[in-house]
Amino acid sequence: MNVGPMELLRKWLSHPQDIYNLLRFKMGGYRTVMPRVDPESLGRGLRTCYRYLNQTSRSFAAVIQALDGELRHAVCIFYLVLRALDTVEDDMTISLEVKVPMLHKFHTYLYQPDWKYMESKEKDRQVLEDFPTVRCPPPCFLSPCGHGCLHHHPWRCLKAV
């Protein structure tokens, strides 16, 4: 469905409160709706992830940081993992012989605690160079056991072995 400019204008003008709220949010009003988080209450890994988030995306960073609690952390990490994947895809200095296999098996790097890629020339390369932190900063709250083990079943906890 292709919407013309007049139809868009009519939709926007029929919701003036939305325009006002969007402008207010954009002009700094987001500070009133964003939950306050004490950076010192976060572990070093999560502080690093939020620093990368703010460096790689201003618009997504504001929306992600407006989320509450653990959801905010999970979305931050997932965004950075996808940013790392997209950084590989966007990097024209990586040969296709290296890039294509890397993209196909990128999901496996989540299970390799020490995997990182140091050859990128892209502006967001820090998410690849520090992928061990980005993939799941310790302690990994994304794992069911809470010990940082990337698995789907609590009985497969690496700490319990």
Image (cartoon, helix red, strand yellow):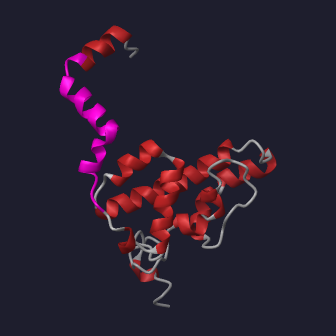
Total numbered labels placed on residues in the image: 0
Residue 137 makes an appearance in the image:
no
Residue in the image at 37% along x and 11% along y: 5
The image shows residue 80 at horizontal and vertical percentages of 52, 55
Residue in the image at 63% along x and 48% along y: 87
Residue 129 makes an appearance in the image:
yes
Residue in the image at 47% along x and 56% along y: 78
The image shows residue 132 at horizontal and vertical percentages of 59, 69
Q: Is residue 31 magenta?
A: yes
Q: Main secondary structure of the magenta part?
A: helix
The image shows residue 119 at horizontal and vertical percentages of 76, 57
Q: Which residues are magenta?
A: 13-36
Q: Name the side, left or right, on which 20 lies relative to 155.
A: left
Q: Is residue 34 magenta?
A: yes
Farthest residue to the front: give it.
27
Q: Name the side, left or right, on which 95 lies relative to 16.
A: right
Residue in the image at 45% along x and 90% along y: 160
The image shows residue 31 at horizontal and vertical percentages of 29, 49
Q: Name the side, left or right, on which 95 lies relative to 9.
A: right
